Every structure is written in structure tokens, then in C-alpha cells.
Amino acid sequence: MTYFRRHRRLRKHPGLRAMLQENQLRIQDLIYPIFVKEEGEGATEILSMPGIYQHTLDSLEEEIKEVLRLGIPAVLLFGIPAEKDALGSQAYASDGIIQQAIPVIKALAPDLLVTTDTCLCEYTDHGHCGCLDHAGYVLNDESLELHKKAAIAQARAGADIIAPSSAMDGFVHVIRQGLDEAGFPLVPIMSYAIKYSSAFYGPFRDAADSAPSFGDRKTYQMPVANRREAMRELASDIDEGADFVMVKPALAYMDIIRDVRERTDLPIVTYNVSGEFSMIKAASQNAWIDEESIVMESLLGMKRAGADLIITYFAKDVARWLSATES
Ligand code: PBG
């Protein structure tokens, strides 16, 4: 008789299937992004991201309490300032919205890890991630000085983790130096090391009010077709002292997550971005797909690809689903 393998032997019993599960998604893997707006009152739902809000300092409290209740270990903050200018000065003003929000969060939840996105696009009147020359080109080294100031302001306000996302060359190096000199040698940098110039950020730009007023981000974010170039971005951020490396977006870039896993022992974070969230939400609201199964499968796929941590707008839902299966 011809011999063949019975793979189904190990799939018959649900208990055995559970024992043999190779990758797990845990609540501890999740980072929940939160938008904080300086102007207005209460929370405003983002049209293209159902269930996600632009908070104000007063509506933040409920959100933070829920995050705590669900056991989510970390949040990632984005600020939407009342005033924007060419140099994004509210990103590094000592009373900028994020610098105000951090102590509010820390008072409610001293152990919740507060990660801050360090970038200028929400703070500049032109919507680019740095400052510009006369022709509208985003200046690298001049922008780095502003990012460094923003990172220090965030650390002074109590941020636990700094997450620079501007995609400027040398941002980890300059921010590391700045943090060290300002007395924050133990504040880690979660670098958006590999950040593609992606259409999947569309809904975020509504949420954070950060769409560029002209042009695009292609002179600084990575071309979507390139894989070797991602490894060069990775290498420089590792050299510069990144403590975590991020791959962003996630779903269309699982090959890159795997490449990174094979090249570094640093913790890998992936960002399940706004467009990935909105696609699943829209389809599930139409009952075309089952939201819970699709989300869990997608996030487990990111873990299988090699991610340690996942930044996701689904974090609260996932935490609920995971606790329900445990109890
Ligand atoms: C800031 C930043 C962006 C995102 C995270 N940080 C937008 C961009 O680069 O245009 C996108 C996140 C998302 O789409 O959920 N530079």
C-alpha cells in the first residue's frame, strides 16, 4: 500500500489542536492608538473609522479607564493641536496637547505605558512630517532638530516610550542623543524603521487631520515595491540604537515582517493601520465578513510573520474577545 501522511490525526481533537497551536495572540501584545484633540469638548467619532474617536482632555478619562479595565498594557498617542504653523511648534511646546495629555493619563493610570508618536505632520500647517525649503522639499537635518525637541518634550511630560515616525534619515540617532542629554537614557525608542508610503494611511489622515496640503510623502517614506531597501532602513535604525523596530503597514507587508524577524533579535512591532481597520469595519458592518474571525486571523498572521507587538485600533475588541475565550 502506498504510504501517505495523516495530518488530520493531530486535528481531530479540539484539545490537541489547542495544545499544538504554534502562535498566540495575547492582550499583552497590543498597543492601542488614541487621538487627543486640543480644541472642543467631548469625543468626536471619526467618520471613516467607526468606534474610534478624537478625544479631548475631558473625554480621555473614560477611554483610559476602559483600556485599563481590559488589561491593554500600552497606548500610542497622537495629538491634534488647536494651532498649526510651518514648524509644527505645538509638537514641542511644553503645553502642547500631548504634553498636557500625558500627565492626565498618568494620574489615572500610572502603570499604563504611554507611547508617543513623534512627528510633525499633525502640527504643521502644510501637513508634512518636517520643515520645508522654498521649493516645498522636506528638509532632513533641520527637521531632525524639531523632532528631537518634540521627543524631549514628550519624555519630560512623562512618556514611557518614544515612537518617531517621520521617516527622516538619522531620526533614531538624533533623538537618542537628545533624550540622553536631557536625562532620559532609559526611555526606549520604538522606531517606525520601515514605513512605506502607503495608501492604507488614508483614514488616519482624517483622524489626525494630517493630510499633506500639497504633494505626497514619497521623498521620505519608502516605495511600496521595495524589499531590499527596507533592510537598509532596518540596518541604519539598529545601528543608531533603536530599541524596537516597526514595520508599517502590516497586512500587505507580512513578507517584510518575516525578513526583519530573520535579521534582528530586537522586538518587532507592526502597525495594523487605519485603512486596514476601515476595510474590515466596512465589510463587517455590511455583514459580508465576520469581524471577530477576520480580525483574529489577521493579527495572528502578523504574529506568525514574526511580530512581537501589534499597534491596532482593534485592541479593545481583541482584548474583549480574548478574555471571553479564557473565562
Ligand atoms: C505620522 C503617522 C502616520 C501614521 C502613523 N503616524 C501617517 C502618515 O505617515 O501619513 C498612520 C497610521 C494609520 O494609518 O493608522 N507620520
Image (cartoon, rainbow, N blue to C red):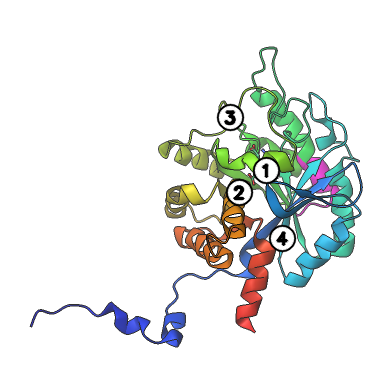
Residue at 45%, 36% in the rendered image: 229
Label 2 sits on a secondary structure element that is loop
Q: Measured from the top left, where is residue 23 in percent x and y?
A: 48, 69
The amino acid type found where label 1 is placed reads: Phe
Residue 273's disc number: 2
- Say what amino acid the circle numbered 3 marks: Tyr
* Secondary structure character of the magenta stretch overall: helix
Ranked by sequence position, the earlier of labels 2 and 3 is 3
Q: Does any atom of ligand 1 lie closer than 8 Å to the CB of label 2? A: yes
The residue indicated by pointer 4 is 74
Determine if residue 271 is in view: no
Q: Which mark is residue 220?
A: 3
Q: Split into 4 quadrants, where in the image is the N terminus?
A: bottom left
**Total residue callouts:** 4
For the record, the magenta segment spans 151-160
In three-dimensional space, the C-alpha distance between marks 2 and 3, rounded to whole angstroms, equals 18 Å
Secondary structure of the residue carrying tag 4 is: strand
CA–CA distance between discs 1 and 2? 8 Å
